[in-house]
Image (tube, helix red, strand yellow):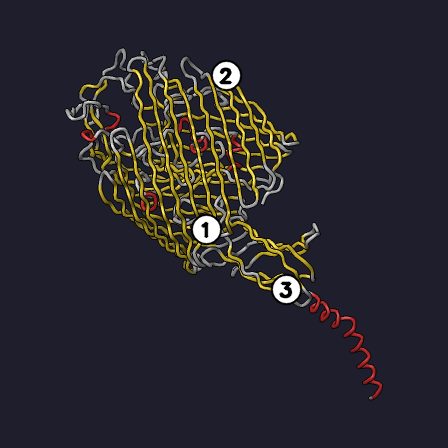
Amino acid sequence: MRLHRFAYLFFAGVFGTLFVQPIITHAQETATVHGTVTDPSGAAISDAEITAQEVGMRRIALRQQTGADGTFSLALSPGKYHLSIGHAAFAPAEQEFVLAAGETQTWDVRLQLEKMSSSVVVSDTAEPTTAQTAPDLVDVITKEQIDQQQAIWMIDMLALEEGVSFDRGGPFGGVTGLFLDGGNSNYTKVMVDGTPVNQPGGAIDFSNFTLLNVDKIEIVHGASSALYGSDAMDGVVQILTHRGTTTAPQLTLEGDGGTFGTGNGGAQLSGLLGAFDYSAAGGYFSTEGQGPGDYFRDATASGDFGWKFSDTDSLRLALRNSSSDAGQPGQTLLPGQAVLGQHNDLHDFSANLTWNFTTGEHWQQRVSGFESRFQDNDFSPFFGSFVSKYNRAGFEGQSTYLFHDGEFTAGYENEVEVGPTETRHNQAGYLEVRRQFGSRLTAVVGGRAEANGFFGTRFVPRVGASYALRDGQGFWGATRLRASYGQGIKEPEILPPDCSPQLAPEESRTVDAGFDQLLASGRIRFSATYFHNHFRNIVSFAFLVPNPNCPAFGGSFFNTESARADGANTSFEIKVTRWLSIAGNYTYDDSKVLVAGPEFDPSFEAGNRLFRRPLHSANLIANAHFLRMNWNLSGHYVGRRSDSDFISTFVNGVCQPGPGSPCITSNPSYVRWDFANSINLGHGLSTVAHIENLFDKHYEDEVGYPALGYNYRLGLTYTWGGDRPM
């Protein structure tokens, strides 16, 4: 028995020495950092990446992702560590820890959404939200996509998106309007860093709007007047400028040129200096055009400057100025319509100063002041100069209370609009509640009372929801459903008082419902959205009904028209390989004039499709990036759309063909292919190559106005500094 007991004690001691004691010793020598990662509302953030790097060492000591409840726990050897938390939709968080053996420290982090991320939407709700919880269809254009296209002009990037069509009166500098989901060209509110840049009650001319200093563009589909007031009848386009993010200054220079005597150059300087971030850019474009009198010159400057008092207190100033001079030779493809010597001088300016700060753990505040100015000088050798000037300026205050899984926002806006013949004083108050129910359902309810200086007070509501139907990996991935309903209003453009005394605001009701589907472990994304848009009280004009009180226009304005647009937007993206992606979209837009005004052109009669809005349109983009080269091929299809030559003679609705009466009432479909390439030469140098209309397709964006034929640009880009992003 004694021998057995001795043997037992001997082997137990050996076992404890070899196996148990190292485990106990290791447990005593390690330290632990644990915590929970949440969003601004306190909801858990899953799949955030936690990295731990020992100070002075280049190797990552430990990497971990947060769980579904947002928690993490890191076991580390004693020492000094730099911990960071990253997520595609949120600004990163960093902190240093000194850990002793056996110590446990807690790090609970509330991340702020990164507004410039493609995974974040800033324009669909009062406060930024992730793309997965936005209730509306929102298309996001990133800086990477702009660079891949080697694009200069805003309208060229917008036209690549679903639901977007446009008209353009000539190849360079012609008046350019945008149509979204069947709405008129003055039904989409356009904002630059929060500043509205539409003319009061009117459209925006995209002819001189460049992509200089632009990092992100959001297109929100559906009436958004509950948040943005007048002009947001069928959606919003928000343009966000570049912000400095590197501790070393970054300077980018670009120069290129090509056909038609075209030259383009630009410079951008950005960086981060302590609490101050800055980005300033300037550019110049010049071309002689492809025909007589078709020259175009444009100069643009843009700046974005921020000061960070603390992580929850910051001030930001954004400025943009554009000046252009464009020859306007007219409808050169129609007999007797070319007019040499016409030109248009356009000047646009916008400014925004915003202060974001918090007052306590649950309250976020935003105060902003904005101003935009427009000056348009049209010169004709027959009629001389006609100058129109507009100005809109105002301020907005917004307060948001964050509660668990949601937020409540209240805001007030005051704006003054000044035109050639009228000044309007507008004010509005709005409310919005966004609530996440569990991990799947997010709902938004809001409304706005708009007191307009022209049409009085109107109330517009909005409601929407997003539902995560399925969370999945593998081939059949996540499925998301979304739906929204909204009402929109739009004030008439500023006219002489006697020309529009009885006009009511134009109104819209929009319904959108769709889904987003991920496949093949996220390598395939497919989206489809049905839309129904109804527009009423549309303002129309007729020469046939003279108004003695409005001799300047020689006719009358009416609230008579009604129209609707039913259709679908679909898009897909396929990551074929690590270096090749293919994306595309298709829009079916069945628009119809329901009630027509006393128009002088049968193209606007009841039963016709809405003017210059195609029934079918599509885009296809292939992008390959390998061996320090990027190759991009894009195809654009625009179907037949109703149009007019505006010179034909009609008798009882029937066109009378003859000299000077071509009887054109529609514009044929076309397909255009574009190509872009860049090669990284090293040492900050890269090439620029862009070919538009690769196969020299002859077509017209508006009847009588020829579009650009085959044209190219070649050049170089040089980037210096900026090697340490923060």
Along the horizontal axis of the image, is 130 left or right of 530? right
Residue with the mark numbered 3:
32
Q: Secondary structure at mark 1?
A: strand
Amino acid residing under circle 1: Thr
Question: Upstream in the sequence, badge 3 or badge 2?
Answer: 3
To which quarter of the image does residue 542 belong? Answer: top left
* Cα distance between the residues tagged 1 and 3: 37 Å
Q: Is residue 570 visible?
A: no
* Cα distance between the residues tagged 3 and 2: 66 Å
Residue with the mark numbered 1:
479
Q: Secondary structure at mark 2?
A: helix
Number of callouts: 3
Q: Residue at x 35, y 16 (%)?
A: 342
In the depicted structure, whether residue 36 falls above or below residue 147? below
Q: Nearer the viewer, mark 1 or mark 3?
A: 3
Q: Quick one: 146 or 91, which is closer to the camera?
A: 91
In the depicted structure, whether residue 676 falls above or below residue 447? above
Q: Quadrant of the N terminus?
A: bottom right
Residue 110 spot, x, y in % from top left: 51, 57
* Cα distance between the residues tagged 1 and 2: 50 Å
Amino acid residing under circle 2: Gly
To which quarter of the image does residue 559 belong? Answer: top left
Q: Quadrant of the C terminus?
A: top right
Amino acid residing under circle 3: Thr
Residue with the mark numbered 2:
261
Residue 122 spot, x, y in % from top left: 43, 45
